[in-house]
Image (tube, helix red, strand yellow):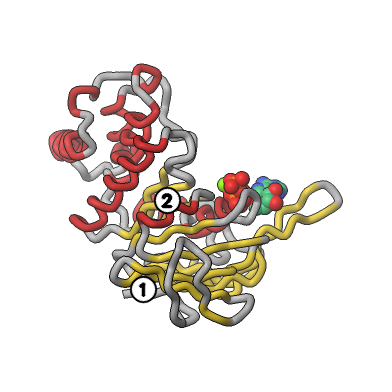
Amino acid sequence: MEIVRLEHVYKEYPLGAHTVQALTDVSFSIDAGVVLAIAGPSGSGKSTLLNLIGCIDTPSSGRVIVAGHDITGKSPDALADLRARTVGFIFQTFNLFPVLTAKENVEYPLLQRHNMSKQERNKRVERLLEFVKLSKYARHLPNQLSGGQRQRVAIARALVTRPKVVLADEPTANLDHKTGEGILALMKDINRKTGTTFIFSTHDQKVVDFADHYIGIEDGQVRFLGVRRDGKWLIRDEWLQKARSDLAETRVSGVGAHVR
Ligand SMILES: Nc1ncnc2c1ncn2[C@@H]1O[C@H](COP(=O)(O)OP(=O)(O)OP(=O)(O)O)[C@@H](O)[C@H]1O
Ligand SMILES: [Mg+2]
């Protein structure tokens, strides 16, 4: 089942008298249940892309379809509603509320669910804290936690609404190598156990190996589409229109225009 589809997406930002072309004619689709890495250099458009898939922003033109809903032309209220029901977002800087404890941060997205009892809420939050191994830290404020622990709170918060898609913008950028790998392994584990789709951005080529699908962007355009089979990446260069082997030490054969 398809969970995300982009069709000829352009995104421009006004900047003074100019416009910045952040995305140019981006098209791809992904199936539910995958772990997708979006990789590219700084300024290539990764955050812009995640913000569109995460219903935080709308494209200048083209279509973005998330879990069957076309976000194009939706009002901010309708987008917020879709976002709350469909996606979980993990920001690069964690974005935890500093005055709320770890537990309260995780609980926060559920407070809008007026039909959920306090008991049910508690149960869900406690289970998730246990899952990310933070039960002992439930009462800690974010500044009483390490970077890796904060990131795990952010993951638990993104998962608490049981979203179809979890988006993570450079989830390892602020962490040391080992902690970063632990976070990615945790996401993969959640993916395997729940079937939740994970999409993360990174500029670190090594981190891409935690994914099973890969989209490489350069200058706001899709440059590479890849899928990992039997531990090997099959990568297609969209610009040169051919398979290639110089990425992540891969052996390559053609991959279709869509990442599946
Ligand atoms: N709100 C904005 N206003 C103007 N230009 C923007 C805005 N947001 C992003 N841009 C521009 O759009 C382009 C893509 O930015 P984006 O943040 O998506 O890149 P990125 O790949 O996430 O980079 P990084 O790895 O540094 O986070 C850049 O040229 C950036 O300067
Ligand atoms: Mg970014």
Pick the quarter of the image with the N terminus.
Answer: bottom left
The answer to which quarter of the image holds residue 233 is bottom left
Q: Position of residue 108 (x, y in %)?
A: 33, 34
Q: Nearer the viewer, residue 179 or 68?
A: 179
Give the answer, above or below, for where 166 lies relative to 64. above
The answer to which quarter of the image holds residue 75 is bottom right
Viewer-nearest of discs 1 and 2? 2
Give the answer, above or below, for where 161 lies relative to 28. above
**Other residues around mark 1 within 10 Å, as few (<14) / some (14–19) / many (≥20):** some
In the rendering, which numbered label is found on residue 157? none
Q: Earlier in the sequence, mark 1 or mark 2?
A: 1
Regarding residue 115, the answer to whether it shows in the image is yes
The answer to which quarter of the image holds residue 105 is top left
User: What element does badge 1 sit on?
Assistant: strand
Q: Is residue 13 rendered to the left or right of residue 180?
A: right
**What residue sits right under mark 2 in the picture?**
207
Question: What residue is shown at x 63% (from left), y 78% (from top)?
Answer: 240
The amino acid type, in three-letter code, at marker 1 is: Glu
Q: Is residue 244 rendered to the left or right of residue 1?
A: right
Question: What residue is shown at x 72% (from left), y 60% (from top)?
Answer: 21
**From mark 1 to mark 2, how far is it between C-alphas?**
24 Å
Look at the numbered disc 2 and say if its residue's Cβ is closer than 8 Å to ligand 1.
no
Residue, far right: 17
**What residue sits right under mark 1 in the picture?**
2
The amino acid type, in three-letter code, at marker 2 is: Val
Q: Is residue 208 rendered to the left or right of residue 20?
A: left
User: What element does badge 2 sit on?
Assistant: helix
Q: Where is residue 44 in the image (x, y as percent from the top left)?
A: 63, 55
Give the answer, above or below, for where 5 lies relative to 170. below
Q: Position of residue 144 (x, y in %)?
A: 35, 17
Give the answer, above or below, for where 10 lies relative to 162. below
